Amino acid sequence: MLPLFSSVVHAVSDAVGPIVLAAADAPPEDSLDTQGLAEWLRGFFGPLFLVIVSVVAIFFLFTREITRFVQFVLLAIFIGIVFYVPQIIEVTATALARAVGVPVD
C-alpha cells in the first residue's frame, strides 16, 4: 500500500508543481491594487454611516430621549471625524506627545 501512496504523491506534485511555479512567476501588474482602497471604502460606507446616524438620531428625538440623543450625536461626531479625517489621529497623538515633553521627530 505504501508504493501506491508514494506514486499518488508524486503524481499530485507533478501536476501541481507547474501551477504553483506559474503563480509565483506572475507579473506584479496582476496583483491586487489597493491604492484607492481607503477612498473607495469612505465613499461606500460614508453615506451608509450618515443614514444610520440620521435614523437613530431621529428615533431618539421622537421618543424624547434628549440625553441619549446628545450622547449619540457627540459619539457620532467623534466617529465621523475619525472616519472622514483619518490624519487627525496622527496629528492629535503628536500634539499630545509634544505637550507632555516627549521628543517627536
Image: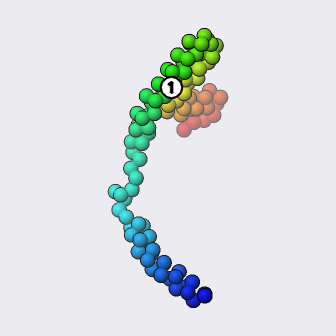
Q: Position of residue 6 (x, y in %)?
A: 55, 85
For the point 39% across and 45% down, the residue is: 35
Q: Position of residue 48 (x, y in %)?
A: 46, 30
Q: Which residue is mark 1?
A: 52
The front one of 94 and 3 is 3
Q: Coloring scheme of the render?
A: rainbow
In the figure, 67 relative to 38: above or below?
Answer: above
Q: Position of residue 93 (x, y in %)?
A: 58, 32
The front one of 39 and 96 is 39
In the figure, 6 relative to 23: above or below?
Answer: below
Q: Residues within 10 Å of mark 1 (few under 14, many from 20)?
A: few
For the point 52% across and 30% down, the residue is: 82
The front one of 84 and 92 is 84
Q: Could you tell me which secondary element the residue under label 1 belongs to? A: helix
Q: Quadrant of the C terminus?
A: top right
Number of marks drawn: 1
Give the amino acid type for the residue marked by disc 1 in the picture. Answer: Ile
Note whether residue 104 is visible. Answer: yes
In the figure, 89 relative to 33: above or below?
Answer: above
For the point 53% across and 80% down, the residue is: 9
